[in-house]
Amino acid sequence: MSKPVIEIKNLEKVYEGAVPVHAVNGINLTITEGEFTALKGPSGCGKTTLLNLLGGLDKPTSGSIEIGGVDITTLSENQLIDFRLRNIGFVFQAYNLIPVLSAQENVSFIMLLQDRPKEEREARAKQLLEAVGLKGKEGQRPGQLSGGQQQRVAVARALASKPQFVLADEPTANLDSTSTANLLDIMEKLNKEEGMTFVFATHDDRVIKKARRIISIEDGKVLSDE
């Protein structure tokens, strides 16, 4: 039986204002090792807020988030930064690559922050770029790559630190249909062959069709979990 990677209990995120907004409203979820899960719902439903809470990019109002048995809501800011660096991979809609670095350097950068040896960084970056279909593109900078290729670099970078799981926020939003199909095939292959856990926030039907678990979010609550 797969072990839990993420355990969420009574999670709440309230944005205070003239009218308080319950972006995440009492969610309980467990995500196990090796899942390929989509959080789906319309814009403003709370799925991106939930993803940001899981990634430690935002603090909940109440509730707990355990990752590998560690409740990240109890960590200090510095502890959280270090925990994210070593345990969570991110794929963003806007790629967030460093323009002045090559594809290989972008993938290696997180391992540099982890103080990994140079030989290990270079070998793993090359291996990951080959795994995402970018062999021969190692020396090219983001501006020399297509949108689909940049997003594949972002996936390789997310895997570089050997995280417990990868969070992907609308990863196909800026891609054409061919690039989307290629990217999803690559992530599905990495999921099946390396057992990497993926959690997507998306309203893209192409991503939802590939997912093996679909969690529908509405008004900050889990509407269904299939």
Image (cartoon, helix red, strand yellow):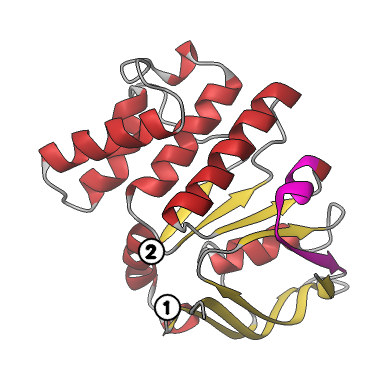
Observer able to see residue 176: no
Q: Quadrant of residue 77?
A: bottom left
Q: Is there a contact, CB below 8 Å, between mark 1 and mark 2?
A: yes
Q: Secondary structure at mark 1?
A: loop
> Residue 5, percent across and down?
49, 74
Amino acid type, callout 1 = Gly
* Rendered residue at 68%/31% (across/down): 181
User: Which mark identifies residue 126?
Assistant: none
First in residue order: circle 1 vs circle 2: 1
Q: CA distance from mark 1 to mark 2?
A: 9 Å
> Residue 21, percent across and down?
82, 71
The answer to whether residue 72 is above or below residue 58 is below
> Residue 180, percent across and down?
68, 31
- The residue range painted magenta reads 206-218
Q: Nearer the viewer, residue 45 or 163?
A: 163
Is 214 part of what is drawn in magenta?
A: yes
> Residue 223, percent across and down?
87, 73
> For the image shown, how many numbered marks are present on the structure?
2
Residue furthest top as drawn:
144
Residue on which the image places disc 2: 87
Residue on which the image places disc 1: 68
